[in-house]
Amino acid sequence: MRSVAWALAALTLAACGGSGTKPEDMTVEEHQAAVASDEKAARLHDHLRLHRRDDAVDSFALAKLYASHAAEHGAAAKQLDAQHAAACEGLAAELQGECPLMHYRVSDVERLADGVRVTFRGAEAGALLRHAECHRAHGASEGREEMPACPLYSKGLNLRAEPSEGGAALFFTSAEAATVERVQSMYEPARP
């Protein structure tokens, strides 16, 4: 019976990323829901430990396991909140969820070995990069459902901006082949 209880606990914890929960695996809301669920499971196992004499299930160890997992989710949620606040400081709340790339026309696209260089007409490099980083942090914190095709939400994406004639160039690069392929397919160079 004890092995069945441990197997169920392992399956439950594995369903939300295992004991090494990373902030980017879930949104703040999802991490907070996992905290509530794990805390409830910890209280249940603690209650069983105190009120049952049956030692078929090691309720004390399971209670500690769930409590530890809840703490990891809580820390991940706080980290996402802090990253969002830092990246978006001073930027109006209504702009944080808006993709900054939608505000500018693309004037040039250059394919790179590790991504693309996209020039946006009328953009200022610092402001564009800041808004892009805020948008990424907002998506990580709040969820990305509204913009599944947004290149800024690509896994392992690196951003860099520099001034360019008539605007700003944003470099979308990555060491991950799938991300490179994704951003290159989203921004095709103009055909002569």
Image: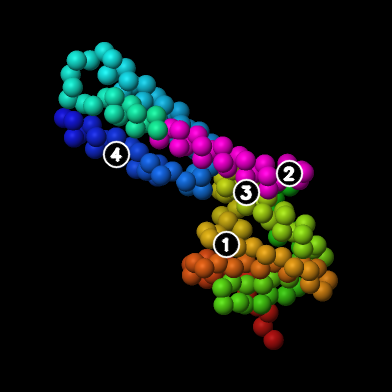
In the figure, 19 relative to 148: above or below?
A: above
Query: What amino acid type should be assigned to the residue bearing mark 1?
Result: Leu
Instruction: Name the residue: 75% across, 73% down.
Output: 107
Instruction: Name the residue: 51% across, 48% down.
Output: 24
Principal secondary structure, stretch drawn in magenta: helix
- Percent of width and height locating residue 150: 61, 58
Of the residues under marks 1 and 4, which one precedes in the sequence? 4
Of the residues under marks 4 and 2, which one precedes in the sequence? 4
Tag 2: Cα neighbours inside 10 Å, few (<14), some, or many (≥20)?
few
The residue indicated by pointer 3 is 137
Of the residues under marks 2 and 3, which one precedes in the sequence? 2
The answer to whether mark 2 and mark 3 are in CB contact below 8 A is no
Q: Is residue 120 magenta?
A: no
Of the residues under marks 3 and 4, which one precedes in the sequence? 4
**Residue interval drawn in magenta:** 69-93
- What distance separates the C-alpha of mark 4 from that of mark 2? 39 Å
- What distance separates the C-alpha of mark 1 from that of mark 2? 22 Å
